[in-house]
Amino acid sequence: MNGNSKTIFNSILSGEIPSHKIYEDESVYAFLDINPLSRGHTLVIPKEECPTMDGLSENAASSLGSALPKICRAIMKVTGAKNYNLIQNNGEKAGQTVPHLHFHIIPRYPESTHSFIWNPSPIDHSDATELSKAIFRELE
Ligand code: 5GP
């Protein structure tokens, strides 16, 4: 299932809007984020128009999955960062501002101060038993 709405990333893919490209193949494009959290903050997108991960075709997912590790390696090598976050927001309420599927690769340096807010609480094992079984069944 593909999304139909054109986004700013379509304009980047078409070259209408310039970008600092770091990688491109038949199905994947990667470029530096315009408002980086750190030096080398990169966006990796499928060329397939799809807003969120659950709609991506298997072929596009496969290409994206195989491109990501090599892009991570190149960014780490060139920037010298030893740590990084790989983040992917799905839906406006989840913090997605551009509805074209994208991964953020965000290098973390010793002097980095950016943070992501996590407020975890211990798992409810009773609910988890039901939930894991239901999702497992869905995936069978
Ligand atoms: P999201 O919030 O959807 O996960 O991330 C969207 C990202 O796209 C943001 O980090 C934002 O800075 C980046 N972005 C938005 N417009 C442009 C643009 O025109 N060029 C580039 N290079 N990045 C963009």
Image (tube, rainbow, N blue to C red):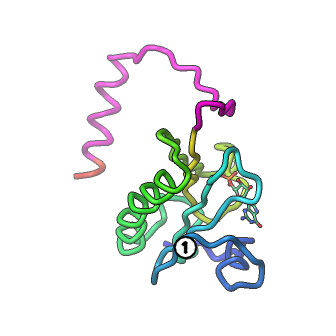
Amino acid under disc 1: Tyr
| Quadrant in which residue 129 is drawn | top left
Q: Which residue is mark 1?
A: 29
Q: Is residue 121 above or below residue 11?
A: above
Q: Look at 77% across and 78% down and name the residue there.
A: 17
32 left or right of 81?
Answer: right
Q: Quadrant of ligand 1?
A: bottom right
Q: Is residue 51 above or below residue 40?
A: below
Q: Is residue 129 magenta?
A: yes
Q: Is residue 74 magenta?
A: no
Q: Whole-percent x and y of residue 125?
A: 33, 17
| Quadrant in which residue 38 is drawn | top right
Residue sitting at the far left? 140
Query: Bounds of the magenta span?
Result: 109-137
Q: Look at 43% across and 66% down and name the residue there.
A: 64
Mark 1 nearby-residue class (10 Å; few <14, some 14–19, many ≥20): many
- Dot 1: element: strand
Q: Whole-percent x and y of residue 56?
A: 46, 67
1 left or right of 118?
Answer: left
